[in-house]
Image (spheres, rainbow, N blue to C red):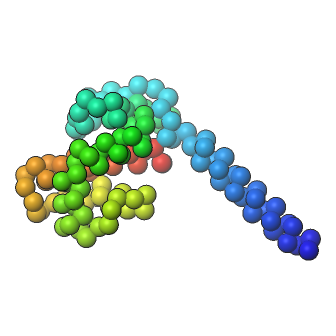
Amino acid sequence: MLRIKVIIVAIISLLIMTIFVSYNNTSSKVVDEYDISKLGTDFGESEAYAIGANINGMPVFKNASMALQQALIDYKNGIETIAKEFDLGDISNSNYKEYGIYGWQITIGTEEEKQQGRIVSQFFDIYENGFK
């Protein structure tokens, strides 16, 4: 019985530590301004794409969730083309990096879809900075 209690306490402690580390992930927090002229693309005027610098000086979206939702709308055709050419499922936390890797490599679709694919790659370069 004591062994079970020790295991339960250990599991609860691990869960609390995981939540604490996730909550305090400073790489996702904007701590300074970022000179967006350094970026290779302009995502547009939408506030969803507002970018700042994290503690490491890397560009991060001020609201990554809002940025992703807007990108899914703005670059829908490019995202669909990436998924089609490289047989990817819907964008998720487990495969967004693949969209970033393959986006600039699109060989099918219209020129607009290929351009959107390149923008999607650049988007996920910034998006993933919030998780490093």
Tell me where residue 102 appears, x and y as whole percent: 25, 60
Left or right placement of residue 73 versus residue 77 in this view:
right
Q: Residue at x 37, y 62 (%)?
A: 95
Foreground: 45 or 122? 45
Foreground: 76 or 49? 76
Tell me where residue 36 appears, x and y as whole percent: 30, 30
Q: Is residue 34 above or below residue 129?
A: above
Tell me where residue 94 appears, x and y as whole percent: 42, 62
Toward which corner of the image does residue 96 lie, by quadrant? bottom left
**Number of marks in the rendered image:** 0
Left or right placement of residue 24 versus residue 64 in this view:
right
Q: Is residue 124 above or below residue 41?
A: below
Q: Is residue 30 above or below residue 16?
A: above
Q: Residue at x 49, y 40 (%)?
A: 28
Tell me where residue 77 appears, x and y as whole percent: 18, 53
Q: Is residue 57 visible?
A: no
Q: Residue at x 87, y 67 (%)?
A: 5
Foreground: 30 or 44? 44
Residue at far left of view: 110
Toward which corner of the image does residue 59 lie, by quadrant? top left
Quarter of the figure that contains the N terminus: bottom right
Left or right placement of residue 46 versus residue 85 in this view:
right
Q: Is residue 22 visible?
A: yes
Q: Residue at x 43, y 58 (%)?
A: 93
